[in-house]
């Protein structure tokens, strides 16, 4: 399955017009790069955190992956039960700050365009991702580069300034903080021994790939 085929399936199952009129254009900024990385991995068990409208869920399922998705937004708001069934995926409605899912380990955890929206310290979520991976499993994350941020982030590019979970009220802003290549790598290596961080030429999005120690 191609990413374009997955997007057409999602558009046909979307609960409203926003996916086709707006959201799909945002996906075009980064999903092809995500798929290029994942296509080089042997299919296995994957968790997509913050799956949006379900495009990667659909693409992954169509390319042989066993897919779980995790979102604090209830099923039906973006991903419809019909699309979930079509993908043969499992939906977990859960705040990822509550810790790892008790459903076994994953070969791959995806977290695309999620980190800047987190209301609490992102290193807590990176640690949770690391815990949910099998030895040798990989985390693939993406974020818009800081100078491409749409809104003014209250904590700038200092992710350490974001309040810890449970210690303060949630940040109300849509974008709580932003990243540079350096701060993105800094975040990922709080739980992983190394991180490959890059920004494709012409893309406003940065990518990070990490592996849990074997």
Image: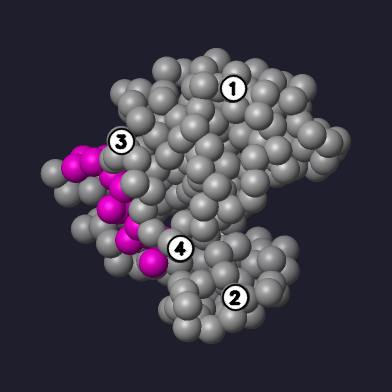
- The secondary structure type at the circle numbered 4 is helix
In primary-sequence order, the first of circles 3 and 2 is: 3
Whether pointer 3 and pointer 2 mark residues with C-beta atoms closer than 8 Å, the reply is no
| Residue that label 1 marks | 85
Q: What stretch is highlighted in magenta?
A: 124-138
In-image side of 137 versus 187 (left or right) = left
| Residue that label 3 marks | 107
- The secondary structure type at the circle numbered 1 is helix
Q: Does the magenta stretch include residue 145?
A: no
In primary-sequence order, the first of circles 4 and 2 is: 4
| Residue that label 2 marks | 170
| Residue that label 4 marks | 97
Q: Nearer the viewer, residue 86 or 126?
A: 86
- Residue 160: horizontal and vertical position, in percent? 44, 79
In primary-sequence order, the first of circles 4 and 3 is: 4
In primary-sequence order, the first of circles 1 and 2 is: 1
Tell me if mark 1 has few (under 14), some (14-19) or many (20+) residues whose alpha carbon lies within 10 angstroms of its own: few
Q: In this view, does 188 lie above or below 165?
A: above
């Amino acid at each position: 399955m191609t990413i374009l085929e997955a997007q057409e399936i999602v558009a046909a199952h979307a609960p409203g017009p926003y996916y086709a009129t707006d959201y799909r254009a945002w996906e075009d900024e980064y999903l092809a790069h995500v798929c290029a990385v994942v296509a080089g991995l042997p299919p296995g068990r994957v968790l997509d955190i913050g799956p949006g409208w379900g495009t990667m869920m659909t693409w992954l399922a169509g390319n042989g992956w066993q897919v779980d998705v995790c979102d604090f937004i209830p099923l039906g708001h973006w991903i419809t039960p019909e699309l979930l069934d079509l993908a043969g995926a499992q939906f977990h409605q859960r705040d990822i700050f509550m810790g790892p899912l008790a459903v076994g380990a994953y070969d791959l955890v995806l977290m695309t365009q999620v980190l800047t929206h987190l209301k609490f310290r992102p290193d807590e979520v990176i640690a949770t991702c690391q815990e949910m991976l099998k030895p040798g499993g990989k985390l693939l994350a993406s974020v818009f580069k800081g100078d491409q941020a749409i809104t003014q982030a209250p904590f700038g590019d200092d992710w350490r300034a974001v309040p810890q979970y449970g210690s303060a009220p949630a940040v109300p802003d849509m974008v709580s903080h932003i990243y540079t290549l350096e701060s993105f790598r800094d975040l990922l290596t709080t739980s992983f021994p190394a991180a490959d961080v890059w920004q494709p030429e012409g893309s406003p999005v940065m990518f990070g790939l990490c592996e849990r120690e074997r």
